[in-house]
Image: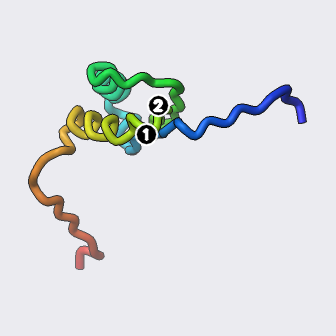
Amino acid sequence: MGFASLQFDESIGKLSVVGSGMKTHSGVSATLFGALAKAGINIEMISTSEIRISVITRSDQVIEAAKVVHTAFGLDGDSEAVVHAGTGR
């Protein structure tokens, strides 16, 4: 199949930041990476697309990573989110 070996590791975790606004807002990756670095969370691998940045880190750090990233992007507030949906009629 074209490869010499295969490695399997159950101790990895994945965190993704997703949003169409990343195409037009600079600094998203800097905020993400800075928050993780400040918390001492090591990034093992990075994958990006136009609307997504994913990082691989140790599985025992994923929950803490999500918390610090939420804080860095101001998503950790105490207020309840309200979503309005419908046809607008």
Q: Quadrant of the C terminus?
A: bottom left
Residue furthest to the right in view is 1
User: In the image, what residue type sits under mark 2?
Assistant: Thr
The circle drawn on residue 78 is: none
Q: Is residue 84 visible?
A: yes
Do residues under tags 2 and 1 come within 8 Å of each other at their CB atoms? yes
At horizontal 27% and vertical 20% (from top left) the residue drawn is 38
The circle drawn on residue 15 is: 1
At horizontal 18% and vertical 44% (from top left) the residue drawn is 76
Tag 1's secondary structure? strand
The spot of residue 75 in percent (x, y) is 21, 44
The spot of residue 42 in percent (x, y) is 42, 22
The circle drawn on residue 57 is: 2
Residue 43 horizontal side relative to residue 78, left or right = right
Q: Nearer the viewer, mark 2 or mark 1?
A: 2
The spot of residue 86 in percent (x, y) is 28, 75
User: In the image, what residue type sits under mark 1?
Assistant: Leu
Tag 2's secondary structure? strand
- Above or below residue 37? Residue 15 is below
The spot of residue 3 in percent (x, y) is 84, 29
First in residue order: circle 2 vs circle 1: 1
